[in-house]
């Protein structure tokens, strides 16, 4: 059983930081038999007396970047179903194209920027992760970034986490990767002693027991994809911290898969979300399955 998508869209800017994403997308398409589409978005400049010439030159450079990416993919034994050159705002154009094509996976690269890792092309790719309606695979630059020998799935029992886990498990089957399923829930906050605290502790214990049963059930579901049962870990730490600690255990960075929760109608600082913290701080590739409003 596999839930791997039949179409992949690689968004690239042609930089060295995008090279690992190109390699990962090419490899995934070859192993899964999925269509591979490639997009490069070029940007116009404010009007000037030489605007026509500048615009033509920028478009020409954009086409060169796209052609070079196609060439590299074909040299690596891959096949590009279609190459797409777009003009405009990167995140908007990439997301729109992914919807027009009906792709099941978006692939982008990433690079480190100071002490905080940012997604390739800065805020535009961050917006791709947060606003795309399909899963996004963010691939780190580095010789050991791909393929993953281990996959870590962050579970929170949402539909988004389920989708992330199933797609990550399908990727794991392509590479024979070990899979770890993690559920983390912060422990009981400080409350006054007495009957109120006792009742809260009992309620927390009941919740934990139910959560462990649900995690066992999720492991059995992933077993249908993997062919073997994933390892299970339960923690009382904060989810992002627990996931990142697990991601930094081995010598080679794993693929981390998480769901991105919806904002439920309220504005929330992006750095407060588990998915954003994982994307910005994980040492290796990260797969994010989006929250999609129906």
Image (cartoon, rainbow, N blue to C red):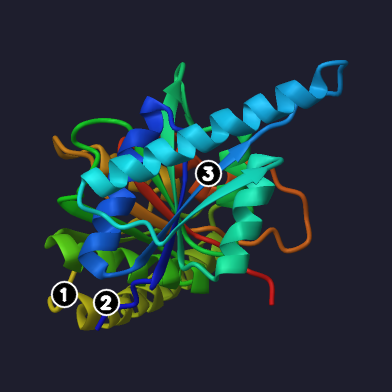
> What is the C-alpha distance between the residues marked 3 and 2?
24 Å
Can you tell which quarter of the image residue 154 is in? bottom left
Looking at the rendered structure, the secondary structure element under dot 1 is loop
Does residue 114 appear left or right of residue 180 in this picture? right
- Does 112 sit above or below residue 80? above
Which residue is drawn at the image coordinates 71% and 47% (left, top)?
A: 268
Looking at the rendered structure, the secondary structure element under dot 3 is helix
The residue indicated by pointer 1 is 229
Residue 205: % across, % down: 40, 70
Q: Tag 1 or tag 3, which sits nearer the N-term?
A: 1
- Does 121 sit above or below residue 36? above
The residue indicated by pointer 2 is 222
> What is the C-alpha distance between the residues marked 1 and 2?
7 Å
Can you tell which quarter of the image residue 156 is in? bottom left
Which residue is drawn at the image coordinates 18% and 74% (left, top)?
A: 226
The residue indicated by pointer 3 is 276
Residue 132: % across, % down: 60, 57
- Does 43 sit above or below residue 277? above
Q: Nearer the viewer, residue 234 or 103?
A: 103
Circle 1/circle 2 CB separation < 8 Å: yes
Does residue 162 appear left or right of residue 123 in this picture? left
């Amino acid at each position: 059983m596999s839930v791997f998508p039949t179409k992949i869209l690689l968004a690239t800017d042609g930089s060295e930081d995008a090279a690992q994403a190109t390699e990962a997308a090419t490899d995934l398409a070859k192993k899964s038999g999925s269509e591979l589409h490639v997009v490069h978005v070029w940007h116009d400049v404010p009007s000037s007396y030489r605007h026509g010439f500048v615009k033509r030159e920028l478009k020409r450079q954009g086409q060169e970047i796209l052609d070079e990416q196609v060439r590299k993919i074909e040299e690596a034994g891959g096949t590009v179903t279609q190459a797409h050159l777009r003009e405009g705002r990167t995140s908007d154009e990439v997301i729109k194209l992914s919807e027009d094509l009906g792709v099941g996976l978006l692939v982008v690269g990433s690079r480190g920027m100071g002490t905080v890792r940012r997604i390739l092309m800065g805020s535009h790719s961050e917006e791709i992760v947060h606003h795309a309606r399909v899963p996004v695979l963010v691939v780190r630059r580095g010789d050991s970034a791909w393929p993953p020998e281990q996959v870590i799935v962050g579970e929170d029992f949402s539909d988004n986490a389920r989708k992330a886990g199933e797609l990550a498990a399908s990727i794991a089957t392509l590479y024979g990767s070990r899979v770890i399923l993690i559920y983390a829930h912060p422990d009981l906050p400080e409350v006054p002693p007495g009957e109120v605290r006792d009742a809260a502790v009992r309620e927390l214990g009941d919740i934990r027991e139910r959560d462990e049963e649900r995690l066992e059930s999720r492991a059995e579901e992933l077993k249908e994809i993997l062919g073997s049962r994933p390892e299970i870990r339960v923690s009382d730490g904060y989810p992002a911290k627990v996931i990142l600690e697990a991601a930094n255990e081995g010598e080679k960075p794993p693929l981390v898969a998480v769901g991105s929760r919806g904002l439920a109608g309220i504005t929330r600082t992006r750095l407060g979300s588990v998915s954003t913290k994982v994307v910005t701080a994980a040492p290796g590739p990260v797969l994010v399955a989006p929250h999609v409003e129906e």
